[in-house]
Each structure stands twice: as C-alpha cells, then as structure tokens.
Amino acid sequence: MAEKKKNDGEDFVMDLAEHVTKQRWWNKVFGNNSGPAAEKYSVATQLAIGGVTGWCAGYLFQKVGKLAASAVGGGFFLLQIANHTGYIKVDWKRVERDVNKAKKQLKLNTEKPPKEVRTKVDEVQTFVKKNIVLTGGFAGGFLLGLAS
C-alpha cells in the first residue's frame, strides 16, 4: 500500500486511488484465485462469448428435451396399449417389489456423496470463481435459449 507523506495529502490520495483501481471487484468477492483466466478478455467479450454459447446450449437442450420427453411418453403409451390388448402381461407385484428395493438402495447412498462427485463439484466451483463473468453470461444465454 502507498506510504503517507508528511505534508502532501494529495499524493496519498492519488496512490490510494491507483491501488483501488488495480484491485478487481471479483477479487474482493471471490478471493485471489480468480486471477489470470478471468482477465484474459474484456468483460464485454466474456459476456458475449458466455451468452452466445449459453443460448446455443439452452436451445439445443430445449429441442433434445422435447424429443426425449416425446420418446419416453410415446414408449409408455405403446406399452400401455400392448398391455391392454393382451400382447404383454406385466407382473405388477414384482414391479412394486423392485421399485421398493431400489428406493431403499437410493436412500442408503444419499447420506454422503462419493469422493469423485465432491472432486468434480470442487472443480466446477473453482472454474466458476475464476470465470465469473463468462459463466454469468452463459447462464443468462442458457435461460434465453430455453425460452426461445
């Protein structure tokens, strides 16, 4: 930090102003690990890149999601027709037993996430902290892509 001079208060104010302009706002919020990756491009460029890629991802997610929902719903519809007309016979007692068994297994595994999941979550958090402007643009673009 700048040193204070005896009778020269203006120099102290200028040195303090220079110090403040060198500090990025995201360093204050997220710490010093948001360094060089976040500063490669201007804020406008990061927002534009994040927004465009987010919009593309959101648009594709919307289209693929509709296709997947239609396929799953159509599959269930065809299975119900086949069951109703007698082409297939479903053992509902066995289905219920298997579903209850799966529920119990899922409840046992939800207490503590595996180490691989925790590691990936930490990696994602670090990336978001280092590229906060880019990920913010991506999130906005993704929501716009879903809406279009």
Image (spheres, grey):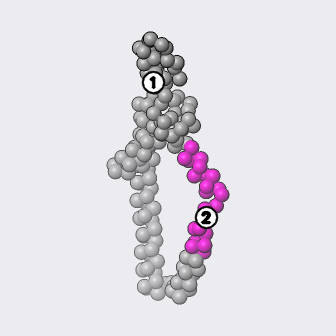
Residue count near mark 2 (Cα–Cα under 10 Å), binned few <14, some 14–19, many ≥20:
few
Q: Secondary structure at mark 1?
A: helix
Residue of label 1: 21
Which comes sooner in the sequence, label 2 or label 1? 1
Q: How many marks?
A: 2
- As measured in the structure, the alpha-carbon distance from the residue carrying label 2 to the one carrying label 1 is 44 Å
The residue at 51%/40% (across/down) is 30
**At numbered mark 2, what does the secondary structure look like: helix, strand or loop?**
loop
Does the image show residue 8?
Answer: yes
Furthest-left residue in view? 148
Q: Amino acid at mark 2?
A: Lys
- 31 over 148 or under it: above or below: above
Confirm whether the magenta stretch covers residue 123: yes
52 vs 2: above or below: below
Residue 16 inside the magenta-drawn segment: no
The residues colored magenta run 105-126
Q: Nearer the viewer, mark 2 or mark 1?
A: 1
Q: Dot 1 surroundings within 10 Å: few (below 14), some, or many (20 or more)? A: few
Q: Is residue 120 above or below residue 32?
A: below
